[in-house]
Image: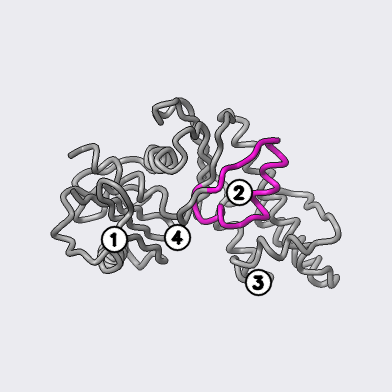
Amino acid sequence: MITAGCDIGSLTAKAVILNEKKILGSHVMRVLNNPQDSAVKVMDMAGEKAGISLDDIKFCVGTGYGRNKIPFVNESISEIACHGKGAQWLVPKVKTVIDIGGQDCKVAKLDENGELLNFATNDKCAAGTGRFLEVMSKLLNVPLDDFGTLSEASRKTLHFSSTCTVWVQQEVIHLVNEEVPVEDIVAAINSAMAGRIAILANRAGVEKEVCMTGGVAKNDGVLRNLEKNLKIRIRKIKVDPQIVGALGAAIFARESL
């Protein structure tokens, strides 16, 4: 029995193809001009990696911002529920899931069955989202993938006076003009983002075990600062954290069958 999940977010599209035991194939890509094209492309790529025809997929669940515009799904489910379901499949004892997407951040508190107990979301401000890091990456001309390792080389702690993306941009420009080492600036950016996420997490309530999903979970600098702020260990998951929402959708699809 083969099922699939398709997660169309604000910045990236993700797809996972699943059988009873394991992930057969997955793919992550930047979104195209419309959700329909993104969904078809990302699912085609996941199917190619899985070595199957899309006709073999018995049930598909859509999630993410564009879930209602995916032409081939059988059902649509919220991304909060899907990230919780996917995280629990990977970390069975997880109770708190921190999902940092392109344009929002969500913290979900789960019961022992993976059902949603409480959640908090930040979708009004770019600070604390993947978009914030993308803006800083372009400003510094530093690849996002290097943010985690660069911050490890920092030797001086810096703090921004504001949490607003616009004002932080101005402070970063000033620091660059002052020839402050880029690793110190990147470390301050990671720290500022972790501080914003920690406020949201405390609002929802944090309980062990904790894991992070979404692309920002690949940034060890944010992860380590978040652990310090929350005074808790964050479990690293064993798959690409960007596919967890699509994985949860595929698991929901399997349960629907």
Q: Which residue is mark 1?
A: 39
Amino acid on which the number 1 mark rests in the picture? Ala
Q: Which residue is mark 4?
A: 11
Q: Which residue is mark 2?
A: 128
Amino acid on which the number 2 mark rests in the picture? Gly
Front tag of 3 and 2:
3
Is residue 222 rendered magenta in the image?
yes
> Looking at the image, do the residues carrying marks 1 and 2 touch, with CB atoms under 8 Å apart?
no
Amino acid on which the number 3 mark rests in the picture? Val
The residue tagged with tag 4: helix, strand or loop? loop
- The residue range painted magenta reads 213-236
| Inter-mark Cα distance, 1 to 4 | 13 Å
Q: Between residues 122 and 27, which one lies in front from this camera angle?
A: 27
Disc 4 crowd rating (10 Å Cα; few below 14, some 14-19, many 20+) is some
Is residue 208 rendered magenta in the image?
no
The residue tagged with tag 1: helix, strand or loop? helix
Q: Earlier in the sequence, mark 1 or mark 4?
A: 4
Where residue 251 sits: x, y (%)?
30, 43
| Inter-mark Cα distance, 3 to 2 | 19 Å
Disc 3 crowd rating (10 Å Cα; few below 14, some 14-19, many 20+) is some
Amino acid on which the number 4 mark rests in the picture? Leu
Q: Which mark is residue 142?
A: 3
Q: How many marks?
A: 4
Disc 2 crowd rating (10 Å Cα; few below 14, some 14-19, many 20+) is many
Quick one: which residue is furthest to the left in this view?
Answer: 55
Position of 15 relative to 82 (above/below):
below
| Inter-mark Cα distance, 1 to 3 | 29 Å
Q: Residue at x 28, y 55 (%)?
A: 17
Residue 80 placement, left or right of 182: left
